[in-house]
Amino acid sequence: MTQKIRVSCSKSNLKTIRDFVNSVLGEHEIPDKEMNLIIVAIDEVCSNLIIHSHSCNSADELEIRITSESENLVFEIIDQGEIFNITDYSVPTMEKVIKNKKNGGIGLILVKKIMDRIQIEKNEGLNVCRLYKSLAR
C-alpha cells in the first residue's frame, strides 16, 4: 500500500510533511523512538531539497510516497530540482565535524545512520530519493 502527499517547496510545509509521515508510521507497530528517528531523517532530506535544491521556491513541489512492503517501509521523495546524491556523500566523523566547526552535514550523517539503505535515481526528468527502513525486530 502506498500513501502520498505533494507539497510546495516552502519551509512552512515541513510540518505538513512531518505530520504526514507521523500519521503513516502510526499505522504500524513502531516504537516511538524509532518513529521519531525516521521522521527526523525524512525531514532532513526534505529540508535540504526545499532549501538547497529549490531555494524555497513555492512554485516547485516535492512528492513524498510511503510504501509498506511486508516488514519494510520505502520512502520516496520525488522532485525536479538539482540532484544531490546522498549515497556519494562521504560521512565525516562527528569529531571531524566538531573540530572543523562545520555547520552543515550533521543531518546527512543522521539520515545515513537512521535509514537502512538509500538509493538515488534520475528518471524521466524526476529525481527520486528512496529511503528504506526495515520494521523487522
Image (spheres, rainbow, N blue to C red):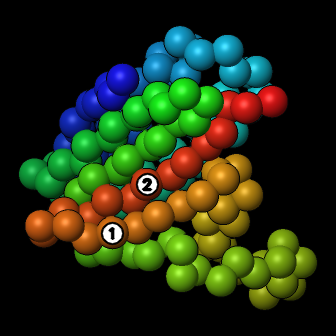
Q: Tell me the CA gap for discs 1 and 2.
A: 8 Å
Pointer 1 local density, CA inside 10 Å: few below 14, some 14–19, many at least 20: few
The x, y position of residue 92, in whole percent, is 75, 81
* Drawn side of residue 80 relative to residue 4, left or right: left
Q: Residue at x 84, y 72 (%)?
A: 94
Indicate which disc, 1 or 2, sits on the residue closer to the N terminus. 1
Quarter assignment of residue 121: bottom left
Q: Is residue 52 above or below residue 61?
A: below
Image quadrant where one finds the N terminus: top left
Amino acid type, label 2: Arg
The answer to whether one can see residue 108 in this image is yes
136 over 31 or under it: above or below = below
User: Residue at position x 55%, y 48% from top?
Assistant: 132
Q: Which residue bears the numbered disc 2?
A: 130
Up-down relation of residue 25 to residue 47 (above or below): above
Residue 55: tell me if it is visible. no
Q: Which residue is mark 1?
A: 121
**Callout 1: helix, strand or loop?**
strand
- Pointers 1 and 2 in contact (CB under 8 A)? yes
* Quadrant in which residue 19 is drawn: top left
Q: Residue at x 10, y 51 (%)?
A: 59
Count of numbered tags: 2
Of residues 104 and 83, the one nearer the viewer is 83
- The quadrant of the picture occupied by the C terminus is top right
Give the residue type that dot 1 points to: Glu
